[in-house]
Every structure is written in structure tokens, then in C-alpha cells.
Image (spheres, helix red, strand yellow):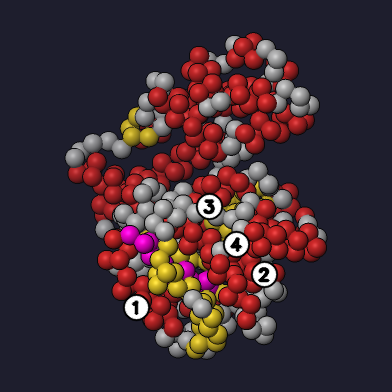
């Protein structure tokens, strides 16, 4: 992506984002020492976490690759957050003890990891962001935490303190491989992903969940299978939004991040909505050669996502009930709709004729997500404009709404094993 824009474009777009949309923490970087610079930047939000994930980073080869690890130690301004406030205080203290203080301003503290006891070859640093003293609004949750970290990375990039054009986003439960940064180097992306690399705005690494506890591991295996099944279904349907939406395996181009106006401030689903915006700007590239191990663990820190899903699956298993997921027929219907979009422009003045090529279920589902309103608004568009806009309009969110509409219209969920057996993909 770096070759797709000039330095002037980069600076103008990022400066505009920082001026109008960035979080207040970026102002504190005004006094960030000019002599500190890093090759890579990695953002991890931390709530109810131990020091283990930072220790894992410090002892890895990644810490020898000039990385700035931005840890946003946060808690929600809720009763639940208050109950766990001491954990955040201890985490910041424990991270600080790993190295030497280099700089401190407001709620930011920079810790040097060079020549630390755990890794004498380390040449990285940790920027700790205290967002527990001034807690995060509960409804903005992890989305705001990620945004704070990413916004700081943008500001440091503009200042010349970060060399890479990529912001890496992960979580405390992720075990990042030694090729995590190197796979994103322009020369490596160009070799392994050819044309996609030229317009890459984001990457999603390969992943797997693991737990030594059998019940948790099995529940995670089921959920992970469902995630892979969903993306495989989107690929089968030839959707341009066929990618994984997991915050711990995500990296994104800084310029594109600023164009998309950053992470949405949500307590869950922030990765889904950011990728939905980024995918309209370029390619979301899957990196099968970079495999991230994720701790399989149930959780109630977010309203939906992996943790709550695993908890739900474990409860179903205890009750001897099947875990159900999307009927594969929804992806067959989706494929037919996406193919039919190719000739929608020709029938924009008489959409009912176009609808005749689709099943009754797809017709109803498309109408329920607003296809007729879209066609009306695009009456004056030429074919090139229309075809582009229909893909922008029918994005990953609309795709999900379409699938849910089909489910409500009769294509109900079925046991995942049955869905896998029936799926033509």
C-alpha cells in the first residue's frame, strides 16, 4: 500500500485525521523525544490481564526487531470495572519494572526494554497508556482502547518515530510468531501476495485456538470451525468481504486507517466495522504463512465475540444440545444475488424484472435490507458508478443482515456438523 500514495498525501490525510478524529492522548506526544524511533508498532488493549503477554513479547524475537509495543491498560467506568481496578494498577507497575523509564507525560509512560534481563538482545520499548485512572465509557469499551493505541501510532508515524506503514493490532491472549513483522515488509508482501499487495489496506493472519482444558478447547474448536465455515461460505459466494474479523490477528495500513477515520468506539465488533470500512478502500489480504496461536478462554468482558460464544457453547454441551450455525443454503442464495448484481443496472428502472431471476426468499431478503431504496438513489448513475456503489452498499454488514433475513424467512440454523456435511464449499 505504501507505493499507492505520496508522502504529501500521507501527511495531509493523517494530519487531517489527527486534527479532527483522534483521541486526546495524541496531544501528550508533543514532548515525545525525537531521538526515540522504532521500525514497527504493535497495539494491545489490556483489561483484567496479567504481565504474561508482555513477558512473552519481551522474550521473543519480535522484541529484537525495534518494536514499540503500545499497551492501553484500561477499564470500563462500570461496577464491573471498579471491581477489577487494582489489577490494572498492578499491571502498569509490573510492566514498568521490566525496564527503565524513558519518558512520561500525562497518562503516557515509555519504558525501555533494551538489554532487559529476559532478553539481552531486545531493542524495543513499551508505551503504557493509563486509561483506568480515567476509565473508558463502558459502551465504548475495547473499541476506544484500540483507537487510542492506533491513534498514538499514527501521531508517532507522522513524527517519524515509526518507520513501518503498518499498525499491528492484537490482544493479550495472542502468541505472535517470529515472522509477524517481516511478513508485512513491502518486499515480502509483494513476493507472497503479488497484485493484492499493491492495494493492501489490511491483513488477517492465520490463527488457531488452544487450551489445555479439554472442555474449553473443544468449545473453541467448534467456534473456530464456525468462523472458518462462514468465511468459506463468503468465498464460495464470491463476496468481496470474505475475510476474518478477529481483532487479535489484524494489521492495517496507516493511511487507510486515517481514511476510514479509525476504530469505531464500541464495546464489541470494532474489528468487524473497521474492516468493513477498510475493505472499501482496498484489499484485505489473508496471510496463511503467519499463524497466531490464541489462548482459548471463555470470557464475559465483551457482549459478543469469541469469549461469550465459547461460554455459550460450553453451556450447550453441558445440556447435551447441539451448537447450531448458518444453513449453507444462505451462501447459495448469496452467491446468486451477487452474480445477479452484474445486470442490476440494466434493470434499474424495472427492478421487478430483475427480481424474477432470484428465488422468492432472496427477493424478500433483499427488499428487507433496502435494495429498492438503493436502486432509487442510483437512478442517474452510469453503469461503472452503479456497479461500484452496489458493492459498497452491499458490504459485510448488509451481507450479514441479508443472511439473517434469510434465516428469519425460513432458512434456519442447523447443527454445525450437519451444515458442514451439506455445504458445497
For residue 264, above or below residue 378: below
Upstream in the sequence, badge 3 or badge 1? 1
Dot 1: element: helix
Of badges 4 and 1, nearer the viewer stands 4
Side (left or right) of 224 relative to 323: right
Residue 73 lies in what quarter of the image? bottom left
Residue span colored magenta: 69-78
| Chief secondary structure of the magenta portion | strand
Q: Identify the residue position indicated by label 2 in the image.
A: 157
Of badges 2 and 3, nearer the viewer stands 3
Dot 3: element: loop
Q: Identify the residue position indicated by label 3 in the image.
A: 264
Dot 2: element: helix
Q: Identify the residue position indicated by label 4 in the image.
A: 22
Instruction: Give the Cα separation between the discs numbered 4 and 1.
Output: 28 Å
Q: Identify the residue position indicated by label 1 in the image.
A: 90
Instruction: Give the Cα separation between the discs numbered 2 and 4.
Output: 14 Å
Instruction: Give the Cα separation between the discs numbered 2 and 3.
Output: 21 Å
User: Which residue is nearer to you in this view: 162 or 224?
Assistant: 162
Upstream in the sequence, badge 2 or badge 3? 2
Instruction: Give the Cα separation between the discs numbered 1 and 2.
Output: 30 Å
Instruction: Give the Cα separation between the discs numbered 3 and 4.
Output: 11 Å
For residue 409, above or below residue 30: above
Upstream in the sequence, badge 1 or badge 2? 1
Residue 377 showing in the rendered view: yes
User: Going 54% across and 23% down the picture, which residue do you hit?
Assistant: 366
User: Going 60% across and 33% down the picture, which residue do you hit?
Assistant: 394
Please say if the residues under marks 1 and 2 sit with CB atoms less than 8 Å apart: no
Amino acid at each position: 500500500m505504501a507505493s499507492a500514495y505520496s508522502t504529501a498525501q500521507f501527511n495531509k490525510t493523517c494530519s487531517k485525521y489527527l486534527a479532527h478524529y483522534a483521541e486526546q492522548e495524541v496531544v501528550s506526544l508533543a514532548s515525545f523525544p525525537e531521538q526515540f524511533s522504532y521500525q514497527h508498532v504493535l497495539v494491545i488493549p489490556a483489561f483484567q490481564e496479567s504481565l504474561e503477554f508482555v513477558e512473552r513479547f519481551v522474550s521473543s524475537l519480535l522484541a529484537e526487531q525495534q518494536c514499540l509495543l503500545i499497551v492501553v491498560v484500561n477499564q470500563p467506568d462500570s461496577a464491573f470495572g471498579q471491581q477489577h481496578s487494582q489489577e490494572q494498577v498492578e499491571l502498569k507497575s509490573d510492566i514498568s519494572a521490566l525496564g527503565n523509564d524513558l519518558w512520561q507525560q500525562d497518562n503516557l509512560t515509555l519504558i525501555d526494554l533494551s538489554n532487559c534481563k529476559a532478553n539481552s538482545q531486545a531493542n524495543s520499548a513499551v508505551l503504557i497508556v493509563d486509561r483506568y485512572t480515567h476509565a473508558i465509557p463502558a459502551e465504548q469499551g475495547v473499541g476506544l482502547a484500540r483507537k487510542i493505541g492506533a491513534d498514538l501510532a499514527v501521531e508517532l508515524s507522522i513524527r517519524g518515530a515509526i518507520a513501518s506503514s503498518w499498525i499491528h493490532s492484537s490482544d493479550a491472549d495472542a502468541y505472535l510468531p517470529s515472522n509477524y513483522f517481516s511478513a508485512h515488509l513491502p518486499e515480502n508482501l509483494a513476493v507472497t501476495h503479488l497484485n493484492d499487495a499493491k492495494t493492501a489496506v489490511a491483513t488477517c493472519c492465520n490463527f488457531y485456538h488452544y487450551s489445555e482444558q479439554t472442555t474449553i478447547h473443544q468449545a473453541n474448536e467448534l467456534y473456530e470451525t464456525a468462523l472458518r465455515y462462514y468465511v468459506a461460505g463468503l468465498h464460495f459466494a464470491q463476496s468481496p468481504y470474505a475475510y476474518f474479523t478477529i481483532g487479535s490477528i489484524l494489521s492495517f495500513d496507516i493511511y487507510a486507517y486515517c481514511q476510514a477515520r479509525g476504530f469505531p468506539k464500541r464495546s464489541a465488533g470494532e474489528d468487524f466495522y473497521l474492516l468493513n470500512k477498510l475493505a472499501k478502500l482496498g484489499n484485505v489480504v489473508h496471510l496463511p504463512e503467519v499463524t497466531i496461536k490464541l489462548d482459548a478462554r471463555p470470557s464475559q468482558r465483551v457482549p459478543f465475540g469469541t469469549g461469550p460464544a465459547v461460554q455459550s457453547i460450553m453451556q450447550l454441551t453441558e445440556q447435551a444440545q447441539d451448537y447450531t450455525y448458518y444453513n449453507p443454503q444462505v451462501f447459495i442464495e448469496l452467491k446468486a444475488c451477487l452474480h445477479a448484481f452484474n445486470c442490476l443496472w440494466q434493470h434499474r428502472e424495472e427492478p421487478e424484472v430483475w427480481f424474477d431471476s432470484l428465488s422468492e426468499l432472496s427477493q424478500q431478503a433483499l427488499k428487507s435490507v433496502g435494495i429498492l431504496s438503493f436502486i432509487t438513489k442510483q437512478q442517474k448513475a452510469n453503469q461503472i458508478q452503479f456497479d461500484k456503489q452496489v458493492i459498497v452498499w452491499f458490504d459485510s454488514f448488509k451481507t450479514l443482515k441479508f443472511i439473517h433475513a434469510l434465516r428469519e424467512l425460513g432458512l434456519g440454523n442447523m447443527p454445525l456438523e450437519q451444515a458442514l456435511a451439506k455445504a458445497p464449499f
